Amino acid sequence: MPGKSTYLTDALLNHVLRGVAFPTLPANVFAGLHTADPTDAGGVGEVTGGAYARVSITRATGSFAVPADNAGVRRTSNSAVITYPTPTAAWGYIGFQSLSDAVTAGNLLYSAPIGPSTTLVTGITAGATSLTVASAAGFPTSGNYVILHDAERMLVTAGQGTTTWTMTRAYDGTTAAAHSAGSFVIQPRLINSGDTAPSFAISAMSVDEG
């Protein structure tokens, strides 16, 4: 789920409440792209191949804004656009961006959706062909479009501009699955070979601990 990772949450709780030394962080954090929710544990859906590489960001006051309240969570966002290499092969539908503590592998720190996002009002089964979302703000009001829900992509075919959508399940080679109320629904961005230097903004959210 977008926000602070299990690794970072545990490190903070251990340090603040149990007196455990906080892990030594590198001088930089590294932004990455994902075709599925990285999950709190990390390691899910990161792009591979096609000249993909994480982007290094210096840990400094000039790199991220001062944290501020945003709808009940504390949030900071990058001060400059994060630009990735030009892909030499298709990267697929990108729905999430992450911040990790290493240029490869390492530990996930934060993740955030890319593009329009909302949440599911009522859970759906793997066989459901419609869903209701909390808000349609930012999503297309006409024409078919792809949404990403956890690791499943769906094609919205009706209900555009409303909060109840009809969709084709298991789109683009993914697998239909049940999804719970409150989970994120995202409109991902398709990145193909030769697309010019993909760039995104990321917001790193620190959610309540309890």
Image (tube, rainbow, N blue to C red):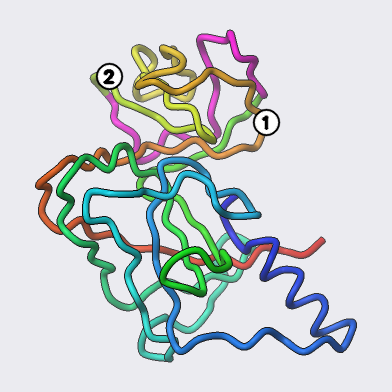
Residue 38, position in %: x, y? 54, 49
> Which secondary structure class fits the magenta region best?
loop
Q: Is residue 139 magenta?
A: yes
Residue 101, position in %: x, y? 51, 74
Q: Is residue 157 magenta?
A: no
Crowd band around label 1 with a 10 angstrom C-alpha radius: few (<14), some (14–19), many (20+): few
| Residue 32, quarter of the rendered image | bottom left
In this figure, which residue is indicated by the disc labeled 2? 144
Q: Is 58 above or below relative to 114?
A: below
- Nearer to the camera, 40 or 136: 40
Residue that protrudes farthest toward the right in the picture: 18
In this figure, which residue is indicated by the disc labeled 1? 181
Task: Look at the numbered disc 1 and give the secondary structure of its residue.
Answer: loop
Q: Amino acid at mark 2?
A: Asn
Task: Look at the numbered disc 2 and give the secondary structure of its residue.
Answer: loop
Left or right for 10, reference 171: right
Name the residue located 59 percent from the left edge and 31 percent from the top edge.
Answer: 120
